[in-house]
């Protein structure tokens, strides 16, 4: 017979009693929007709207929009570079080079022209240095986390499912928690000192700052930004060491840097 007969037609069981098809596999929890995103939106939207109504005259509304959109764009392009490297089957060193080049370009072309912090640790350092009010710093950080969360959800929706494994949180801390926190605090503090005193670099400041940041990443491998660590953890649904190391350590380094920059 030149035609292939389907397994169903070859089945000896009569039509009414044929075995039903197996149920679809359960949805992967990592593909669903994490409850953390919902919590962020619920916790920030109402206070943000109320505060914006009272503070719009002094430009806070525009600053928060810039922080949220800038953080969204920064995390979107960085994670898109990771997904693109995985799609091209680049090795670990090549992927790191692509991501670092993307970060360098975003610092030069996005961070400096926008005037936004785009980094929760630097925002906290500016507050500790007296350059930003505490209430404004809280809203800035909330806008950065919200923009980062929307960026990774956009990547989740756009990237092929088989490439989702390329994105994840920073690696778990090696050794004791105290040494991991100290490592993150040192490099986050150095990054914050650089950001707060970048005007001392003279001409070509964006290029110099971007280059030094990449050197810090290559030397230390630290995250230096709690909102970036949160973005990777949210995408993968793994929150190991997020608070203990990448938030607490970066916060300690940022406060120390801000105090030294007063």
Image (tube, rainbow, N blue to C red):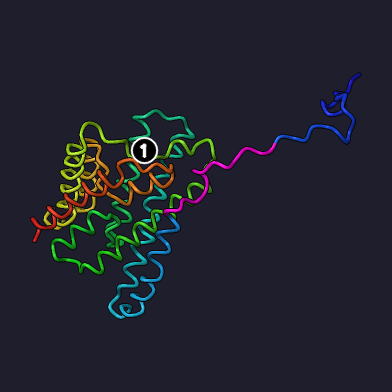
Q: Is residue 187 left or right of residue 235?
A: left
Q: Quadrant of residue 92?
A: top left
What residue is shown with label 1?
98
Percent from the top left, x then y, of residue 60?
30, 73
**Residue 7 or 115: which is nearer the viewer?**
7
Q: Looking at the rendering, in which quadrant would you find the C terminus?
A: bottom left
**Residue 62 or 153: which is nearer the viewer?**
153
**Residue 164 or 237: which is nearer the viewer?**
237
Q: Residue at x 34, y 58 (%)?
A: 144
- Against 23, residue 193 (above or below) is below
The crowd level at tag 1 (other Cα within 10 Å; few <14, some 14-19, many 20+) is some
Q: Main secondary structure of the magenta part?
A: loop
- Against 2, residue 201 (above or below) is below
Q: Residue at x 35, y 64 (%)?
A: 66
Extreme-front residue of the structure: 17
Percent from the top left, x then y, of residue 219?
20, 35
Tag count: 1
Q: Residue at x 36, y 76 (%)?
A: 50
Residue 18 is one of the magenta-drawn residues: no
Percent from the top left, x then y, of residue 130?
14, 66
Extreme-top residue of the structure: 1
Residue range of the region highlighted in magenta in the rendering: 23-36
Q: Is residue 147 left or right of residue 260?
A: right
Q: Is residue 260 left or right of residue 208?
A: left
Q: Quadrant of residue 17?
A: top right
Residue 26 is one of the magenta-drawn residues: yes
- Against 202, residue 131 (above or below) is below
Q: Residue at x 48, y 48 (%)?
A: 155
Percent from the top left, x then y, of residue 214?
25, 42
Question: Under tag 1, what secondary structure?
Answer: helix
Q: Is residue 243 left or right of residue 35?
A: left
- Against 24, residue 71 (above or below) is below
């Amino acid at each position: 017979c030149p035609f292939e007969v389907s397994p169903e037609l070859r089945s000896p069981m009569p039509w009414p009693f044929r075995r039903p098809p197996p149920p679809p596999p359960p949805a992967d929890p990592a593909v669903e929007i994490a409850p953390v995103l919902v919590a962020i939106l619920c916790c920030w939207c109402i206070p943000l709207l109320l505060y914006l109504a009272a503070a719009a005259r002094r430009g806070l509304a525009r600053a928060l929009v810039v922080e949220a959109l800038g953080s969204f764009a920064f995390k979107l392009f960085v994670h898109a570079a990771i997904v693109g490297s995985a799609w091209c089957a680049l090795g670990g060193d090549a992927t790191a080079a692509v991501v670092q080049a993307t970060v360098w370009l975003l610092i030069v072309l996005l961070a400096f022209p926008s005037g936004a912090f785009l980094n929760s640790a630097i925002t906290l350092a500016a507050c500790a240095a007296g350059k930003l009010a505490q209430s404004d710093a809280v809203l800035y950080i909330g806008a950065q986390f919200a923009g980062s969360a929307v960026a990774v959800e956009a990547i989740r929706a756009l990237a092929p499912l088989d490439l989702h494994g390329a994105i994840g949180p920073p690696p778990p801390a090696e050794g004791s928690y105290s040494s991991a926190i100290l490592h993150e605090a040192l490099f986050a503090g150095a990054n914050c000192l650089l950001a707060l005193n970048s005007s001392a670099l003279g001409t070509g400041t964006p290029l110099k700052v971007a280059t030094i940041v990449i050197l810090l990443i290559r030397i230390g491998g630290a995250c230096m930004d709690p909102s970036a660590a949160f973005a990777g953890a949210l995408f993968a649904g793994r929150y190991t060491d997020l608070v203990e190391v990448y938030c607490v350590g970066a916060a300690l380094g940022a406060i120390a840097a801000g105090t030294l920059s007063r």
